[in-house]
Image (cartoon, rainbow, N blue to C red):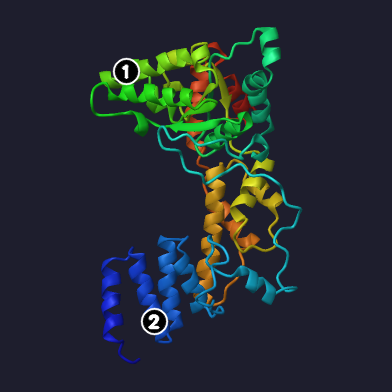
């Protein structure tokens, strides 16, 4: 084997010292490809893609190293997500590549990659509606009855004396779409969306946390109609009896004062939603009538929702002959986040196989079934803790929905 050029040798040493440096590794791969060593370049790019799966430069370099036709320098990327001209590839194999999905496509999904809004940054009414939430019929019906119907029908609300005071608390295992549902509710109301987490509110200086909490609600009042979404409520509104720090107790007191203002004339058009994985750690005063007095259990997605989530996460990946109905059956009990991980793992299997063999191939059912088999349901530890609460701490029927679900699944 001829001796490597000094620059390539130096770059190998640098990459060995900083294996997670993606630009450095891609530079090494470019030089290897320029030396005609495509196999070595493929190996380096494959490692880079493990660190940065969405890197457009890495994807394009992989396509070149595997012998894909080069794109003219002035031509724009076909898609920002893949960095590979799949349209041209499809034209080349038209009539050869089997259909992407076995059945007719669904129209909705339950997951979204939207990030949380910064504090006091109100997102304007979005296009996400409850119709975009796949499956979860029970959740939608409860939302309609407990929250949306009175808001949509002011005449009937006045006739029956229905108050708008109070908010809605979403609870359940992590990764099941509580934030997405909150955004969908805001979309149904045509309202802005203001997401608030503990990091947005807490401050090291005395009095600033309470001031921040007040300013959050003042912002919502100025930009009504607006949904205030309190994420991780167990952190923002932890039980004061268990809170040693007086600053945290004062912050909870301020939150209670702001919630008491919701429903008054001064707060017309401000709606409060909250989410938590551990409602039993939330201060009981927050659950008092007139505050967050309505609860909704958000469980792992049902079969239609799982199909919608899988379709969403496979929509821009190269797949063939995917039976979403079969995948939905074998993935029962997985959360939305688990299903996203299944799709990511299956894509990784196909990518590494393509890198090893030098032949680009599609993601198939074998990849997805293997990935689904390997993923452990992330909600199981939550149900283990929730079971004890349902059995021994269900005062006033607060967790009747959870008890019914556990009995149905024979976990109680």
Q: Position of residue 16 (x, y in %)?
A: 29, 70
Farthest-out residue, front: 222
Q: Residues within 10 Å of mark 2 (few under 14, many from 20)?
A: many
Residue drawn at x 35%, y 71% as measured from the top left:
25
Task: Tell me the residue at 50%/17% (across/down).
Answer: 267
The N terminus, quarter of image: bottom left
| Secondary-structure class at tag 2 | helix
Q: What residue is at 39 percent from the left and 81 percent from the top?
A: 32
> In this view of the protein, which residue sits in the foreground, 45 or 194?
194
Residue at left 36%, top 15%?
Answer: 253
- Given residues 352 and 51, the one toward you in this image is 51
**Residue 387 in sight in this render:** yes
Up the image or down, 386 lies above or below 347; here it is above
Instruction: List the residue tagged with mark 2.
Output: 32
Residue 288's spot in the image, x, y percent? 49, 12
Q: Which mark is on residue 405?
A: none
Tell me if 403 is positioned left or right of 45 in this view. Answer: right
Judge from the rendering whether residue 302 lies leftward or rightward of residue 49; answer left or right: right
Query: On the image, which quarter does residue 320 sit in?
Result: bottom right
Residue bearing mark 1: 249
Image-based side of 53 in relation to 148, left or right: left
């Amino acid at each position: 084997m001829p001796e490597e050029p000094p620059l390539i040798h130096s770059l190998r040493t640098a990459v060995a010292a900083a294996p997670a440096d993606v630009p450095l590794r891609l530079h090494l791969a470019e030089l290897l490809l320029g030396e005609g060593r495509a196999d070595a370049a493929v190996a380096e790019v494959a490692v880079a893609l493990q660190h940065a799966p969405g890197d457009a430069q890495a994807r394009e370099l992989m396509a070149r190293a595997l012998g894909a036709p080069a794109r003219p320098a002035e031509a724009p990327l076909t898609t920002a997500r893949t960095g590979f001209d799949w349209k041209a590839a499809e034209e080349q194999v038209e009539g050869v590549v089997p259909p992407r999905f076995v059945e007719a496509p669904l129209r909705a999904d339950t997951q979204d990659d939207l990030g949380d809004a910064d504090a006091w940054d109100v997102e304007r009414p979005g296009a996400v509606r409850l119709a975009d939430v796949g499956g979860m019929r029970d959740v939608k019906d409860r939302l309609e009855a407990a929250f949306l119907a009175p808001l949509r029908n002011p005449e009937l609300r006045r006739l029956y004396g229905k108050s708008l005071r109070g908010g809605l608390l979403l609870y359940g295992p992590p990764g099941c779409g509580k934030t997405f549902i909150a955004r969908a509710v805001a979309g149904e109301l045509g309202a802005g969306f203001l997401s608030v987490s503990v990091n947005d509110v807490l401050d090291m200086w005395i009095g600033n946390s309470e001031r921040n909490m007040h300013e959050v609600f003042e912002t919502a009042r100025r930009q009504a109609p607006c949904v205030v979404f309190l994420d991780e409520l167990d952190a923002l509104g932890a039980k004061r009896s268990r809170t040693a720090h007086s600053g945290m107790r004062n912050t909870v007191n301020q939150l209670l004062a702001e919630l008491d203002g919701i429903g008054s004339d001064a707060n017309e058009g401000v709606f409060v939603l909250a989410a938590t994985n551990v409602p039993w750690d939330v201060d009981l005063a927050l659950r008092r009538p007139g505050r967050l007095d309505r609860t909704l259990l958000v469980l792992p997605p049902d079969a239609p929702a799982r199909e919608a989530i899988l379709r969403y996460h496979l929509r821009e990946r190269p797949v063939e002959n995917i039976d979403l109905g079969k995948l939905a059956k074998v993935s029962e009990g997985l959360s939305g986040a688990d299903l996203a991980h299944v799709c990511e793992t299956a894509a990784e299997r196909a990518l590494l196989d393509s890198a090893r063999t030098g032949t680009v191939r599609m993601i198939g059912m074998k990849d997805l079934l293997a990935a689904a088999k390997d993923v452990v349901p992330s909600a199981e530890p939550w149900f283990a803790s929730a079971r004890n609460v349902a059995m021994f701490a269900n005062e006033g029927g607060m967790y009747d929905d959870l008890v019914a679900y556990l009995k149905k699944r024979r976990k109680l």
